[in-house]
Image: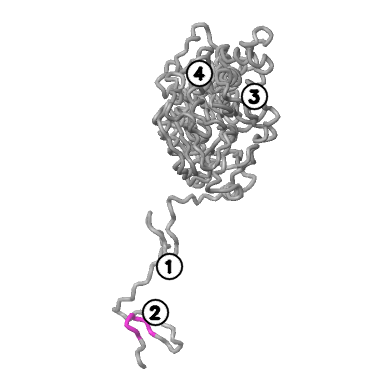
Amino acid sequence: MADNRGRDGGYRPAGGKREKAPARPGEKRPYQPRAERQGAGEKPFRPREGRVAPGEKRSNPWKNDRKPAPVGRSFAPRADHRPAQKRAPNLVPRRVALETLLDVSRSDAYASLALDKRLAQANLPRRDRAFVTRLVYGTLENRLTLDWRIGQFLTDGEKELEPTVREILRMGAYQLFYLDRVPDMAAVDESVSLARAMGLEALTGLVNAVLRNMIRGKDQVTWPKPQEDPCHYLSVMFSAPPALCKLLIEAYGEHGALEILRYRPQQRDVTVRVNYLRCDDARLRSLFADEEIEFDPGIVPGTYKIHNAGDMTRMRAFQNGLFTIQGESSVIAARMVGAKPGQTVLDACAAPGGKTAVLSEMMNDTGRVYAWDTHAHRVELIRGTANRLKLENVRPAVRDASVPREDMAMTLDAALVDAPCSGTGVMLEKPDVKYRVSEEGVQSLCAAQAAILDAIAPMVKVGGTLVYATCSILPQENEGQVRAFLARHPEYAIAPMAQDLPPELAEHEGECGLQMFAHRDGTDGFYVCRMNRVKA
């Protein structure tokens, strides 16, 4: 019979399926895995540690293959289970906030500039940036109220606090009494850790004790009484320096001053304005919808209130000049100029360029808009705004608007003087400005405002327009300034604005212009007055 063996020692029977043939005497049998020979009485295969049995998959040591505990049964930890260590506090956001506040208190820096600089250096994620911003502005806005509360829990020997410790206590107290999302103990613990990180180990006990005592004694604080000293009461309860409280009481009475100082908007929106040279309302609304941005139209046509805005400057539409960030009151001031295509217009105190842009757009990017400021770096801000919005008729320059220019006599169709002022109308956005207010300072500002008006007045043609504006709510800077100007310059007369104002504001226009208030109008506290040159 023929031998049907193959070269591998197998043979193919009539059915065609190759099988293993029994080994002949003295012949080596082909290799057969051990696991297949277990039926021959051999020991079961047990792979050595680190090896894998045939047919099995190698396990992944990085994969958690533990099955979840059945529902209703608790997980029993191993005998060597160790409790999780306490999470180390993330002090970076709070340290950025602290350093910003120290810049303001020690160096008298402007909070907005100091915060922008610190945030740029820290490169924090969006959520932490928002927390730092709220912590800085909230602590500043309530500084005097926080100091009063803190003082209730200091002994006489502790009243003179080291500046860094005072800022840490202010931040801690703000988190305890104004921020609902920060647990009390987290505010205390991280304030103590922050003091330690700043090299103040010896004072960590003080920070810890004061903040804990404030929690326990929050209902035991003694507050001033309004009937005893109204100025002192307003100062402590609404964190306004006594000098500002006195000026507001003199201008609006005790009740009016109270209404102004106690107002806090429930939501801090950002206002934006369409650049009508490159966009329209329908397109901008569509872009906001695509970005899932919540917004409502403002009272000024072409403006929108953005809710929970975040950093709007990162939007491509902003970078491409389709819109700009600008308050409604600022837009109103520029639009009251009534600039027309082909005219020659001056924005005398122009930085950072928002009102300059409104004038340019009203003129359809024709004619010429002179934009002056006294500082070169601020003029660069104007130039940057004009470049981003693609405006060709803007001419930025470093000029002192208070210096008369005989060569420009009667050459302007219109001029806008948004004069330097106390900033009392934008205290909600820039809370640090209210701590700089003093009677002497206001008098000095009034003199500077008068000098600018006197220098610009001769430059406007007969029949031309001069608009005076400030972001102040103090009458001596506003209505009082206009009355004094008209007494010196009888060639000018008040030009009513009601027909060009939103109806909500037109009803509040007085004989000498419009005074806007945040608590009444929902805008910044801005003053605007329009005057026409009626004779040479």
Nearer the camera: disc 1 or disc 3 = 3
How far, Cα to Cα, is label 1 from label 4?
102 Å
How far, Cα to Cα, is label 4 from label 2?
109 Å
The crowd level at tag 3 (other Cα within 10 Å; few <14, some 14-19, many 20+) is few
Q: Which amino acid type is marked by label 1?
A: Gln
Q: Which residue is mark 4?
A: 445
Q: Earlier in the sequence, mark 2 or mark 1?
A: 2
How far, Cα to Cα, is label 3 from label 4?
26 Å
Q: Secondary structure at mark 3?
A: loop
Q: Which amino acid type is marked by label 2?
A: Lys
Q: Earlier in the sequence, mark 3 or mark 4?
A: 3
Task: Spot the residue most to the bottom.
Answer: 1
The crowd level at tag 1 (other Cα within 10 Å; few <14, some 14-19, many 20+) is few
Q: Which residues are magenta?
A: 5-11
Q: Secondary structure at mark 4?
A: helix
x and y percentages locating residue 107 in the rendered image? 42, 20
Give the vertical position of 53 relative to 440 (above or below): below
* 161 sits to left or right of 332: left
